[in-house]
Amino acid sequence: MKEVILIKNGELALKGLNRSTFEDSLIRSLKRRLKELGEVSVTKSQSTIYVEPQEDGFDFEEALARVGKIFGIAGYSRACVCEKTPEAIYEHAVQYLRPVLETAKTFKVEAKRADKSFPLRSPEICREVGGVLLDAFPHLRVDVHHPEHTVFVEVRDYAAYIRVEQLRGAGGLPVGTAGTATVLISGGIDSPVAAWTMAKRGLKLNAVHFASPPYTSPRAEQKVRLLLKKVAEYSGAIGLRIVPFTEIQDEIAKCCPEEYFTLIMRRMMMRIAERLAEKSGSPALITGESLGQVASQTLPALVTTDAVVSMPVLRPLIGMDKEEIIRISRMIDTFETSILPYEDCCTVFTPKHPKTRPTLEACAASEAKLEIEPLIKKAIAETTFSIIE
Ligand code: ATP
Ligand code: MG
C-alpha cells in the first residue's frame, strides 16, 4: 500500500501575500531534511503539502519523525493513497485502517470530494465507507459526537487519500523566513532552549560559544556541539563559532574588582558576539537569560550587558520560570545533555559576592584597566568555525 504524508501549514495561512514565499521556504526545509532518507517528492496543492516517497527503501517512519520537528507545520498525517474508485477506497480503507480500528470502540467517517466527477457525494462516501468498515470490524460502533477515531476520506484530482486524525506539528514559522540571529550558546539548560524558541519563530541560527581551556575541558565544547545538534533537528544547520576566552578571563581576574567579574565577562562576550554576528550577516543576538535567575540577570545587570552592544538582544526566556524552561528542554531532548557536569567558563571565576545592582558607570570604571579592544581583536582572530547539522 502506498503511503504519503499530508501537511497543513501553521500560521502560514495568515500571511496574505507572503504566503507563497513561506510555503516555498517550508518546502525547501522539507526537501533538505528528507532527502537523506531516499527519493521523495514534495509538492503543494491548495493548502496541503504532499510528501510522497518515490522509492521502496524510503524510511517513512523517520520521515514522519523529521516532519514533526519542522517549524511552520501545524498538523500532519500519514495517509494511504489509492485509485479514486469506490471499490479501491473500500478495500484500502479496511486494509489500511485495520491496525487502528481493530483496537478501537467507536469511529466516524468524514469525507471531502474535491473531484466533483466522482460518482458518490460526500455524505454518500461517509455512509458507504462507514458501512464497509462496520462489516469488516463488527465490534465497532459509529459515534458522530465523540468518536475515538475519525476516518477521513478525501477524493482529490489524481487519487483518493484515506487517513485518521492529524498529528500535531511543531508550529511556528519556517526557518529563515524571519532572517538570521546569533545565539550565545553555553553548555547549560537555558541557551539551547532560547535558540530553539527563536528558531521556532522563523529565525535561522548562528551560534557563538566561549571556551576557556584549560579551565573548561574539551568535553564542555563537545557538549555544546551535541546540544546544537539537537537544536539543528528543528532549526536546520547552525554555523558555530568557538571563541578562545581564556586570556580574557585571566585578564579580567587580574585587572578588575572581583564582584564585577561575571558582569565584565558577560560584557566581553556580548561585544565579541556582536562583531561576529555583524561579520556573518546576522542583525540580532539571542541569549538564554531569564530575569532574576542569577546575579548577572537582574534588571540593572542586564542594562549593563545591553549597554555594550547596539544590536537588539532577543531573550525569549526572560519571563519564564526555570520549570517552564526545563519542560521545553526535556521536550526538545537537550535536558539530559545540558545537565552533564562539565564546567562552562561562567562557573570558573564566579565571585563570592557578585554585584546585583551595578551601575553603568561603576561597570565601566571596573573594566578601565582592561585592554578591551586588543583582547577582542585577538579572540576574534583565533575564533574557529564549523557547521553543526
Ligand atoms: P545557560 O543555561 O544558557 O548556561 P545560565 O542560566 O547558566 O544560562 P549564565 O551562565 O549567566 O546563565 O549565562 C547567561 C547567558 O549567557 C546564557 O544563556 C548564554 O546565552 C550566554 N552564555 C553564558 N556562557 C556562555 C558561553 N560560555 N558561551 C556562549 N554564551 C554563553
Ligand atoms: Mg550557564
Image (cartoon, rainbow, N blue to C red):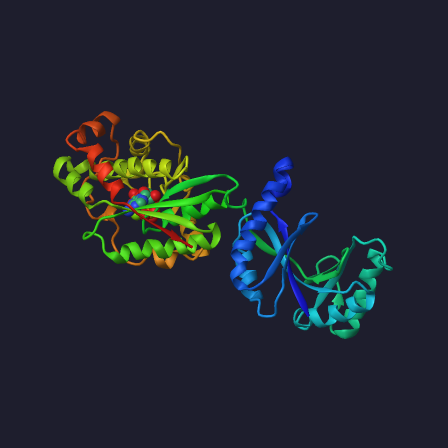
Q: Could you tell me which residue is drawn at 47 percent across and 45 percent down? A: 199
Q: Nearer the viewer, residue 136 or 85?
A: 85
Q: Is residue 351 visible?
A: no
Q: Could you tell me which residue is drawn at 20 percent across and 48 percent down? A: 348
Q: Is residue 316 above or below residue 67?
A: above
Left or right, residue 64 beside residue 250: right
Residue 196 coordinates in the image, percent (x, y): 44, 48
Q: Is residue 242 above or below residue 91?
A: above
Residue sitting farthest toward the right: 119
Q: Report the number of numbered marks.
A: 0
Quadrant of the image containing the C terminus: bottom left
Residue 332 quadrant? bottom left
Q: Is residue 54 visible?
A: yes
Q: Could you tell me which residue is drawn at 15 percent across and 43 percent down? A: 250
Residue 166 coordinates in the image, percent (x, y): 64, 57
Residue 315 coordinates in the image, percent (x, y): 40, 39
Residue sitting farthest toward the left: 254
Q: Is residue 349 above or below residue 125?
A: above
Q: Is residue 227 above or below residue 181?
A: below
Left or right, residue 323 beside residue 254: right
Quadrant of the image containing the N terminus: bottom right
Q: Could you tell me which residue is drawn at 53 percent across and 52 percent down? A: 70
Q: Nearer the viewer, residue 292 or 222?
A: 222
